[in-house]
Image (cartoon, helix red, strand yellow):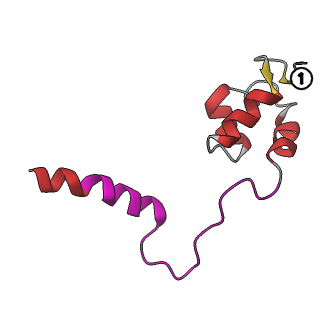
Amino acid sequence: MRRVFVCSCFGVTEAQVKKHAEAGACTPRQIASACKAGTDCGSCVRRIQALLGRGACPSREPAGRTVPALAETALAEVAPLEEAA
């Protein structure tokens, strides 16, 4: 298998970017947090965007939602702790 490097500065390959995208990283900033790609010279950011493509991120919730999705997740994690106390 031929390695295709996306980020020369940190030696990050297309396969690694795709792996992080499959794990939930859906923006160049999230890819950067996962593997540093795009954080030095920045020349690979457009290539990372192209690899992520459109629709890589899950769709957002409708505007009428009362509890933000992240807050809902946090509440679900806190509830068992409160019950145990």
Which kind of residue does numbered mark 1 sit on?
Val
What is the tally of numbered marks visible in this picture?
1
Q: Quadrant of residue 60?
A: bottom right
Dominant secondary structure, magenta: loop
Residue 2: percent from the left, percent from the top?
Answer: 91, 18
Q: Is residue 27 magenta?
A: no
Tag 1 residue: 4
Residue 82: percent from the left, percent from the top?
Answer: 16, 55
- Magenta stretch, residue numbers: 54-78
Residue drawn 67% across and 35% down? 20
Q: Is residue 55 magenta?
A: yes
Residue drawn 69% across and 47% down? 26
Q: Nearer the viewer, residue 63 or 20?
A: 20
Vertical relation: 73 (above or below) 6 = below
Position of the N terminus by quadrant = top right
Residue drawn 68% across and 33% down? 32
Please state if 19 lies on the left or on the right of 83 as rendered: right
Please state if 37 lies on the left or on the right of 46 as rendered: left
Q: Residues within 10 Å of mark 1 (few under 14, many from 20)?
A: few
Vertical relation: 62 (above or below) 1 = below
Residue 42: percent from the left, percent from the top?
Answer: 82, 31
Residue drawn 70% across and 34% down? 19
